[in-house]
Image (cartoon, coloured by chain):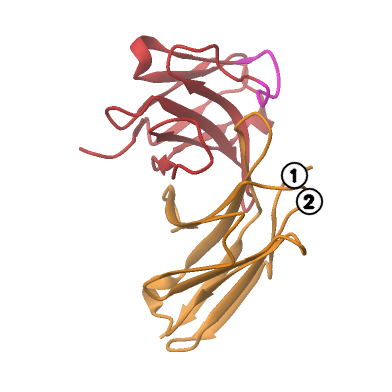
Chain colours: A red, B orange
Amino acid sequence: GAGVSQSPSNKVTEKGKDVELRCDPISGHTALYWYRQSLGQGLEFLIYFQGNSAPDKSGLPSDRFSAERTGGSVSTLTIQRTQQEDSAVYLCASSLVVNSNQPQHFGDGTRLSIL
Amino acid sequence: SQQGEEDPQALSIQEGENATMNCSYKTSINNLQWYRQNSGRGLVHLILIRSNEREKHSGRLRVTLDTSKKSSSLLITASRAADTASYFCATDAIGNQFYFGTGTSLTVIP
């Protein structure tokens, strides 16, 4: 497919468990973003990657959150020791480069529920 | 915070009517984008307007930007049931982050 792909689409886990969310961006896009969207809310920026540069992690809410991007393509967002407040939809987006004149292309997200 | 704020939070109109939603922001921007989000889906880019532009059109969409008032509006003309979605504005900021507002939920009644 030509779009941004995220997996899993839904994840239910118990409090305290670790989770990994995956994002496969559009081929050729050097910029990759992660956002969190709580029910009925806007998007909260978490982190972005631009090519091989160091990522901007300034939006990560705590040290339980981490992300990596291997080979400049697929990215994984990891949440350790999940808490109930981590329940949200996690959205990934990619663009040609990190620039506000570039449209972002979004996946359909991973809906994470912490019991 | 740079975050944009959309107004109104919710809007319900009849099919065929026009829908107008507004976005306000706090600090200077280079670009402003509008996105649509259908229920359970990701966001879809609609239109980008640069800080030196005042108006832009794309099909049934018209976007205006007033940098002196730090506001933008999105007009959807001749609305259709398929336009039912949430609409978000996104503004840029130092560090190449994007700030998304909380969105306007639009319902178009057939």
Whether A41 is among the magenta residues is: no
Image coords of residue B2 (percent x, y): 74, 44
Q: Amino acid at mark 1?
A: Gln
On residue B26, the disc is 2
- Residue B84 % position (x, y): 45, 70
**Dominant secondary-structure state across the stretch colored magenta:** loop
Is label 1 in contact with label 2 (beta carbons under 8 Å)?
Answer: yes
**In the visual, does A80 lie left or right of B26?**
left
> What residue span does the magenta drawing correspond to?
A58-65
Front residue of B9 and A33: A33
Q: Residue at x 44, y 11 (%)?
A: A52
Quadrant location, the C terminus of chain B: bottom left
10 Å crowding of disc 2: few (<14), some (14-19), many (20+): some
Q: Is residue B18 above or below residue A113?
A: below
Q: Identify the disc placed on residue B2.
A: 1
Q: Quadrant of the N terminus of chain B?
A: top right
Q: Position of residue B14 (x, y in %)?
A: 49, 88
Residue A61 at what x, y percent from top left? Answer: 70, 24
